[in-house]
Structure formats: structure tokens, C-alpha cells
């Protein structure tokens, strides 16, 4: 019996050691968006000067679901990370005649786990509302593609998934002579294992992680 136990223990050690050396196992077991630990904090350097601090504040309810509230400056985002996907509460609004008009509020999948190079998902919304006798049409589309496994350009983080997103929003307010307002954003996001977003780049902005403090 002792011999069998020793053999099983040795096999477990060898298996664990092999898993540690296996980059696929490492990536599968890592958390690439750790927003479920209250107190986690990310501090980013903003290109051109300044910083941005992102903190997991608490658990709350949004869209009738229990989620984690994340603060960035004066703004809040709401996340759920379970059942093989990361979901974000989309809250789309527009300012019309001095009033903030809700256009679309719902949970939308942001990423699917595990991440796989080459995978692409498209999320889209088409909604319409009438306010002050005026019809406002809202169209939104986000295409997310996992491009590669790489290091950040400065080499600070390896085994990152590089995720590219193209996001387009069109708000058409049907009044005489009013043209649709279109916003297009393309972004590259580097996600590091057990850290999350370590770099985000758009055409006119760059965030680089300078400090990460995990929560509990």
C-alpha cells in the first residue's frame, strides 16, 4: 500500500511539473480579466501625461443580475465573469435637447473563454425610441478578434492575448436637416495572465499598466 501511495504521489508531482511547463495549460488556467476580486486595482499611465486608476469596488445588481462594479475615474462599468464568458452591461445613451436619453441597456458578451487565436465574434444592437415627439434610432456593432499570443511592445508582459476590436455607433435623430452621428473606434488590447488588461491602444490614446494590486 505504501508503495502504491508513493507511486501515485510521484505521478502527481510529475503531472504538476509538466503542467507548469505546458504553456497551453498555463493559459487555460490563467485569469485574463480578473474583475471578480473586490479591491483589485490597476493604475495606467496615459500617453501624453496623467494616469488612470481602475478599481473593483463591490458586488451589486445591474440589469437584474448580480455583478461586479468597476470604477474608472467618475465612471462605472459592470461585469459578470462566469459560465465560460465575460459579460459587460452596455448602457447606451445620447444627449438630446439637454436631456440624457437611454437607448439600449442590456448584458452583452465581451469575451468568450478560453480565448482562441483567430476567433471572432460580432455583437450588434438596433433600437429605436421616441422622445419629445422625435424618433431616435440607435445602431451599434462591435467586432472582436483574438489576433495572437504575444508580449507587450515593451516586453514587460508575456503570454498576452492581443485582442482587436472595431466598434461603430450610429445615432440618427429624425429631425429636419439632421444627419446621423457616427462614431468609429478601433482598439488593440493586450491581456496578460492573472493581471488582465496591461495595454490599450487606439488611434488617439494609449494606456500602459504601471501597477497592479490584486484584491481578495
Image (cartoon, grey):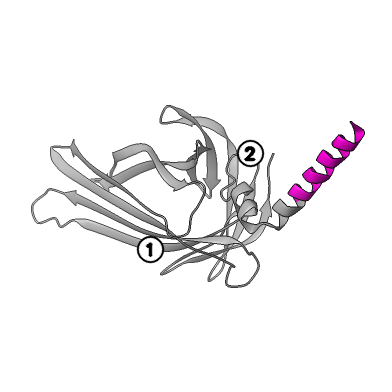
Label 2 packing within 10 angstroms: few (<14), some (14-19), many (20+) = some
Horizontal side, residue 38 vs residue 140: left or right: right
**Residue lying furthest left:** 176
Report whether residue 115 is seen: yes
* Residue drawn 63% across the image and 47% down it: 29
Contact between marks 1 and 2 (CB within 8 A): the answer is no
CA separation, marks 1 and 2?
30 Å
Residue 169 vs 83, above or below: the answer is below
How many labels, in total? 2
Horizontal side, residue 150 vs residue 18: left or right: left
Residue 192 vs 137, above or below: the answer is below
Residue that label 2 marks: 38
Q: Where does residue 105 sit, x and y in percent of width and height?
A: 34, 37
Tag on residue 137?
Answer: none
Q: Which residues are magenta?
A: 1-16
Label 1 packing within 10 angstroms: few (<14), some (14-19), many (20+) = some
* Residue drawn 70% across the image and 51% down it: 19
> Mark 1 or 2 closer to N-term?
2
Horizontal side, residue 138 vs residue 215: left or right: left
User: Magenta stretch containing residue 11, yes or no?
Assistant: yes
Which quarter of the figure is the C terminus placed in?
top right
Question: Depth check: 175 or 204 in front?
Answer: 204
Magenta residues: mostly which secondary structure? Answer: helix
Q: Where does residue 52 sit, x and y in percent of width and height?
A: 56, 57
**Which picture quadrant has residue 51?**
bottom right
Q: Where does residue 107 sit, x and y in percent of width and height?
A: 39, 37
Report whether residue 195 is seen: no
Tag on residue 186?
Answer: 1
**Which picture quadrant has residue 134?**
top left
Q: Secondary structure at mark 2?
A: loop
Q: Where does residue 74 sit, x and y in percent of width and height?
A: 50, 47
Amino acid at each position: 500500500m505504501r508503495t502504491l501511495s508513493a507511486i501515485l504521489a510521484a505521478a502527481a508531482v510529475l503531472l504538476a511539473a509538466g503542467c507548469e511547463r505546458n504553456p497551453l495549460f498555463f493559459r487555460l488556467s490563467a485569469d485574463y480579466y480578473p474583475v471578480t476580486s473586490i479591491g483589485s486595482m490597476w493604475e495606467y499611465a496615459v500617453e501624453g501625461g496623467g494616469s488612470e486608476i481602475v478599481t473593483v469596488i463591490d458586488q451589486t445588481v445591474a440589469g437584474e443580475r448580480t455583478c461586479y462594479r468597476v470604477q474608472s475615474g467618475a465612471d462605472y462599468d459592470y461585469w459578470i465573469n462566469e459560465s465560460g464568458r465575460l459579460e459587460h452591461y452596455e448602457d447606451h445613451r445620447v444627449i438630446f435637447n439637454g436631456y440624457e436619453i437611454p437607448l439600449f441597456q442590456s448584458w452583452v458578451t465581451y469575451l468568450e473563454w478560453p480565448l482562441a487565436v483567430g476567433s471572432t465574434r460580432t455583437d450588434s444592437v438596433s433600437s429605436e425610441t421616441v422622445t419629445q415627439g422625435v424618433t431616435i434610432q440607435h445602431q451599434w456593432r462591435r467586432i472582436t478578434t483574438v489576433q495572437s499570443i504575444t508580449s507587450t511592445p515593451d516586453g514587460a508582459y508575456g503570454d498576452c492575448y492581443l485582442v482587436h476590436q472595431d466598434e461603430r455607433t450610429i445615432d440618427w435623430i429624425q429631425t429636419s436637416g439632421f444627419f446621423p452621428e457616427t462614431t468609429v473606434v478601433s482598439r488593440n488590447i493586450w491581456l496578460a495572465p492573472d493581471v488582465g488588461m496591461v495595454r490599450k491602444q487606439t488611434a488617439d490614446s494609449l494606456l500602459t499598466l504601471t501597477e497592479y494590486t490584486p484584491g481578495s
